[in-house]
Image (cartoon, grey):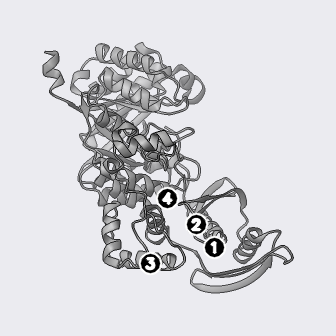
């Protein structure tokens, strides 16, 4: 019997919440065009469900969820709702045109939340669950119920809540570790307890949603799968509230690489993981740490001499998976100034980018400009060009021209030409340094009254002619926007990053922040 089970792997449903919980990372808000881009990549990736947003939270989020529902065909497109009739009706209006619509309703169940946040009794919560799930079920057959803060809830009350949800029509019950509090063994025991105590649990999917406050989100998710969970909720790059969510790429690759111990599989095309990671990193402005598992810049890098020697003899000595398996191209010299458009198109496809002819022409023009100034062109350079030329957000401000004078005896001076809503303006200004001069001039030209919270410079590739990337964080009242800019000239990259952040602030002015689940 054990051998028979071993021969039949169990499918794990991948529920991606990058567009909802992931977007709740500070400064990570996406506009409609960006959400559609990410949703299409998630569809190419092969996720089973896409939680597109929280429609009642703002008109902008409603429109974004509705747009994703219209574009995505294969995955179930899910709208989130609290246990209120208004939330549920709004969520349904947003997803109802989807080929496969779904609703996800939630309410807190821990004593802490009942006492301090909801100020409700347990009986009132049970009634809210019953009414909400029934209302969702009247709209569609795909209905998920989540018990927020489940891992700090009374287990017997959780059983009552899930019994009510299933009896009312839920086809998925979710056990969230909302504040990243539990440990793998505790979570295994909780999922096991729910499986044995809840009536009708064998007829529904058990889902888990783990946060990473103690760095245990992936481990807890895997532990829940071993205990019988059939769905995991996760995000690209592990982004999300506070310390983030369980990382999709880590969960998928753990199941993929360790088939010897995990008799499970997902429907994810792993070769699309890295393109998805890069896209999400760009549109949210959240950089992936170099030592991030699976998709970090150092994930497949070998520097130590002993490691290099072993790798050259047989790559399996120090690599448990190949970079190709997750869609990472070889980080070596592959392109140069003599390369043609056809070669660039092939390289883009190898990196996972299927662009239109118009988009390729835009990338090729920028590629040639950089190739004339830079000896070596790497995959990371090409991706940075794609992100800036193809996936950038609509611009209110565009940097047309920048000239800087600076040195040991010169007063740093910046001459800037901007296009502001189609009108070209030019000005010059001084600063304490070249970057300061650029920023003060641009701020004076635009009238933007935002505070610079963070400024960082990184080299995308090696060498003195490397393509530099600048990241800035701007704050305007309660809004925080992240801007990116890349260029071989780091001062130009700085100007681009500031302008990109200002464009994001303009977008945020029309969008309310989502609330936590």
Residue placed under numbered mark 2 in the picture: 485
Q: Is residue 248 above or below residue 419?
A: above
Q: Depth-wise, is mark 3 or mark 2 nearer the camera?
A: 3
- Assess whether mark 4 and mark 2 are in contact (beta carbons under 8 angstroms): no
Q: Where is residue 147 in the image (x, y as percent from the top left)?
A: 42, 28
Residue placed under numbered mark 1 in the picture: 492
Relative to 24, 201 lies left or right: left
Q: Is residue 187 above or below residue 365?
A: above
At horizontal 43% and vertical 17% (from top left) the residue drawn is: 185
- Assess whether mark 1 and mark 3 are in contact (beta carbons under 8 angstroms): no
Q: Where is residue 119 in the image (x, y as percent from the top left)?
A: 56, 26
N-terminal of the pair, mark 3 or mark 1, is 3
For marks 2 and 4, give the CA distance.
Answer: 10 Å
Residue placed under numbered mark 4 in the picture: 282
Residue placed under numbered mark 3 in the picture: 337
Q: Depth-wise, is mark 3 or mark 4 nearer the camera?
A: 3
């Amino acid at each position: 019997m054990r051998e028979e089970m071993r021969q039949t792997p169990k499918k794990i449903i991948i529920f991606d919440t990058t567009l909802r919980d992931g977007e709740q990372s500070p400064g990570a808000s996406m506009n409609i065009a960006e959400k559609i881009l990410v949703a299409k990549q998630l569809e190419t990736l092969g996720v089973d469900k896409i939680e597109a947003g929280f429609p009642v939270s703002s008109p902008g989020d409603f429109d974004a969820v509705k747009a994703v529902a219209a574009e995505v065909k294969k995955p179930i497109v899910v709208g989130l709702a609290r246990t209120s009739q208004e939330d549920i009706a709004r969520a349904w209006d947003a997803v109802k045109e989807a080929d496969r619509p779904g609703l996800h309703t939630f309410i807190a169940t821990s004593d802490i939340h009942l006492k301090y946040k909801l100020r409700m009794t347990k009986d009132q919560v049970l009634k809210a669950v019953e009414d909400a799930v029934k209302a969702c079920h009247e709209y569609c057959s795909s209905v998920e119920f989540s018990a927020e803060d489940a891992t700090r809830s009374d287990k017997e009350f959780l059983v009552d809540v899930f019994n009510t949800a299933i009896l009312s029509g839920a086809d998925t019950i979710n056990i969230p570790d909302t504040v990243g509090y539990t440990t793998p063994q505790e979570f295994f025991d909780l999922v096991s307890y729910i499986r044995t105590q809840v009536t009708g649990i064998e007829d529904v999917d058990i889902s888990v949603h783990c946060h990473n406050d103690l760095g245990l989100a992936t481990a807890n998710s895997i532990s829940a799968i071993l205990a019988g969970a059939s769905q995991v909720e996760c995000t690209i790059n592990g982004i999300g509230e506070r310390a983030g969510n369980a990382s999709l790429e880590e969960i998928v690759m753990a199941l993929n690489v360790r088939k010897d111990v995990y008799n499970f599989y997902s429907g994810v095309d792993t070769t699309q993981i890295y393109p998805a990671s890069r896209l999400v990193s760009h549109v949210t402005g959240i950089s992936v740490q170099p030592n991030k598992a699976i998709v970090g810049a150092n994930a497949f890098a070998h520097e130590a001499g002993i490691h290099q020697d072993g790798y050259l003899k047989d790559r399996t000595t120090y690599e448990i998976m190949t970079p190709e398996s997750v869609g990472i191209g070889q980080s070596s010299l592959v392109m140069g100034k003599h390369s043609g458009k056809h070669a660039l198109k092939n390289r883009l496809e190898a990196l996972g980018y299927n662009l239109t002819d118009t988009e390729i022409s835009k990338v090729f023009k920028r590629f040639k400009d950089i190739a004339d100034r830079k000896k070596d062109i790497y995959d990371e350079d090409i991706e940075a060009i794609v992100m800036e030329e193809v996936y950038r957000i609509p611009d209110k401000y565009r940097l047309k021209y920048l000239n800087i004078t600076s040195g040991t005896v010169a007063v740093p001076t910046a001459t800037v030409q901007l296009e502001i809503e189609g009108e070209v303006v030019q000005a010059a200004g001084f600063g304490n340094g070249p970057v300061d001069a650029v920023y003060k001039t641009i701020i004076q030209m635009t009238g933007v009254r935002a505070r610079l919270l963070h400024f960082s410079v990184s080299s995308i590739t090696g060498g003195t002619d490397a393509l530099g990337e600048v990241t800035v964080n701007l704050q305007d009242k309660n809004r925080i926007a992240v801007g990116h800019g890349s260029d071989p000239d780091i001062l130009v990259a700085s100007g681009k990053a500031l302008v990109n952040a200002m464009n994001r602030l303009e977008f945020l002015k029309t969008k309310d922040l989502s609330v936590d689940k």
